Image (spheres, rainbow, N blue to C red):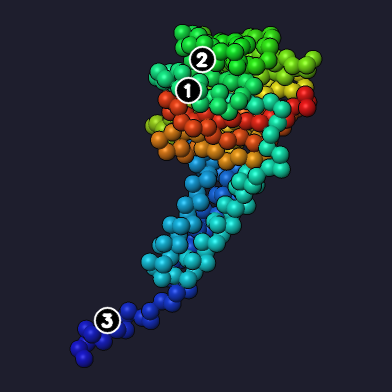
């Protein structure tokens, strides 16, 4: 045996066992599990990293199948065992939303949809929304002309309606006290008009409804840019907090997932649906639920997505248990 051969055998050392291989893979699984369970502790620094993680939190579950595949390729028992951590964390965080409620029906059915200002199929969109048999429909990205077409399409099913700027509300029940709510971020001009407040009247009881469309978020030079949305959410929260009525519903395209702590001033005032795990945007491959129906003084028992329309958002229907019942 040559000197070089003896040197190669000596320096290569014993082969690693299945419990020694894949330490970096195991560390990745641990990190995914930590992010799933402790996402609220991720700071909103470095380009709003916290909001970014929370916006795509369910997709951290991909660490499980990818981790298993990588562990098998690496032949690492350690990495396979570590994959159980993000699996358990994902189940812990999201299983309650996936379980069916005992009674998903409420006494008020609300449909929310960003119909998209490029959606020309008004009749087809209205047909999808009416199939859910709503008591109330809130729409965003509707111009005055398009709103009139939806009024015609909804017809006698939703005879009461109010619009403001690019949002509108159509209802089976009478609407009163319609007024614009200014949720413009600082520096945005008055042509930006995206929030409407009405009072729904039924059998002597009243429910206040806000229909809102918060600013979009972007990936830019500053990372995950959410500042305009956050400022608008704060103003909407102030309007909801100032509302004197016992029962308040907030419906709209919030351009945020409910796990995003950046909009906590709003979500702390209302309750999320008890069940329902629906991704609504974009329709080509939905990755996040940014269209919501939330409530104070009432319970949203379930939300679910409706079939596609001509919009880039999926509509959602929510069943709300109000004091009327």
- In the rendered view of the protein, which quadrant contains the C terminus? top right
Q: Helix or strand or loop: what does disc 3 sit on?
A: helix
Relative horizontal placement of residue 51, taking residue 206 as reference (left or right): left
Residue 154 is situated, as x and y percent measured from the top left of the image, at: 55, 16
Q: Helix or strand or loop: what does disc 1 sit on?
A: helix
Residue to which mark 1 is pinned: 125
Is residue 145 visible from the viewing direction of this image?
yes
Residue to which mark 2 is pinned: 153
* Residue occupying the point 45% across, 62% down: 68
Residue 249 is situated, as x and y percent measured from the top left of the image, at: 67, 24
Q: Earlier in the sequence, mark 3 or mark 1?
A: 3
- In the rendered view of the protein, which quadrant contains the N terminus? bottom left
> From mark 3 to mark 1, how far is it between C-alphas?
71 Å
Residue to which mark 3 is pinned: 8
Residue 278 is situated, as x and y percent measured from the top left of the image, at: 55, 38
Front one among 104 and 143: 104
Q: Are marks 1 and 2 in contact (CB under 8 Å)?
A: yes
Relative horizontal placement of residue 165, taking residue 159 as reference (left or right): left
Front one among 63 and 43: 63
Q: Quadrant of residue 246?
A: top right
């Amino acid at each position: 045996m040559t000197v070089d051969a003896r040197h190669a055998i000596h320096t290569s050392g014993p082969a690693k066992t299945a419990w020694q291989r894949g330490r970096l893979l195991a560390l990745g699984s641990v990190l995914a599990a930590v992010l799933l369970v402790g996402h609220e502790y991720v700071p909103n620094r470095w380009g709003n990293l916290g909001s970014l993680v929370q916006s795509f939190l369910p997709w951290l579950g991909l660490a499980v199948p990818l981790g298993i595949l990588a562990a098998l390729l690496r032949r690492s028992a350690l990495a396979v065992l570590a994959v159980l951590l993000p699996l358990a964390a994902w189940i812990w965080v999201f299983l309650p939303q996936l379980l069916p409620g005992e009674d998903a029906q409420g006494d008020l059915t609300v449909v929310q949809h960003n119909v998209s200002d490029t959606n020309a199929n008004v009749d087809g969109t209205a047909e999808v929304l009416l199939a859910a048999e709503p008591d109330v429909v809130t729409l965003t990205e509707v111009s005055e002309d398009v709103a009139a077409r939806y009024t015609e399409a909804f017809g006698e099913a939703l005879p009461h309606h109010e619009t403001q700027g690019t949002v509108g509300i159509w209802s089976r029940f009478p609407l009163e006290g319609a007024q614009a709510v200014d949720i413009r971020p600082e520096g945005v001009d008055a042509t930006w008009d995206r929030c409407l407040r009405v009072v729904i009247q039924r059998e002597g009881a009243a429910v206040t409804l806000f229909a809102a469309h918060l600013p979009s978020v972007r990936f830019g030079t500053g990372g995950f840019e959410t500042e305009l949305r956050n400022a608008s959410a704060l103003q909407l929260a102030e309007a909801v907090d100032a509302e004197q009525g016992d029962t308040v519903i907030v419906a709209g395209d919030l351009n945020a997932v409910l796990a995003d702590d950046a909009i906590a001033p709003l979500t702390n005032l209302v309750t999320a649906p008890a069940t329902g795990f629906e991704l609504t945007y974009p329709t080509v491959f939905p990755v996040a639920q940014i269209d919501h129906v939330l409530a104070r003084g009432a319970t949203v028992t379930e939300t679910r997505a409706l079939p596609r329309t001509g919009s880039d958002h999926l509509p959602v229907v929510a069943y709300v248990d109000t004091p009327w019942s």
